[in-house]
Image (cartoon, rainbow, N blue to C red):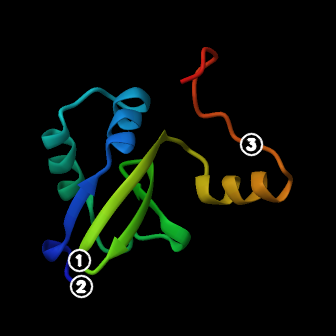
Amino acid sequence: MRLDELQFIVEEHAYKRYCQRVEPVTKEELLSLIREQIRPGHYRQKGYLLLDDVWWRYSVTDSIVTLHTCYGRHHIDLPAAIRWAKQHRDRIVLAGPYGD
């Protein structure tokens, strides 16, 4: 599948989390940013995607990439951290001190 053939869908939850955790933008601006930032090799195992230091949870069906949630910008390997937290029955808090 070629990158220029991909269609992107940003679910409402992912869009709200991006605006909350990264920056407020319109959905059209966000889709434009994603199309600009997507490059070969950005796909990660187990449904995680890293674009411009922003972690996303995603799935692919045919040539449609659906972004389910946005974890925000992080300097850590977020998929590895999430796996560790699940193994140890712990959690990673991504929201500020006042919650979502």
Decide: is 60 above or below 26: below
* Element type where label 2 sits in the image: loop
Residue positioned most to the top: 98
**Residue 30 location, x and y as percent?**
22, 43
**Residue 15 location, x and y as percent?**
32, 39
Marks 1 and 2 close (CB-CB < 8 Å) = yes
Q: At label 3, which amino acid type do we have? A: Arg
For mark 3, what is the residue? 91
The nearer-to-camera label among 1 and 2 is: 1
For mark 1, what is the residue? 63
Decide: is 14 above or below 77: above
Residue positioned most to the front: 12
Distance of mark 1 from mark 2, alpha carbons? Answer: 7 Å
The residue sitting at 32% across, 61% down in the picture is 66
For mark 2, what is the residue? 1
**Residue 39 location, x and y as percent?**
28, 67
Q: At label 2, which amino acid type do we have? A: Met
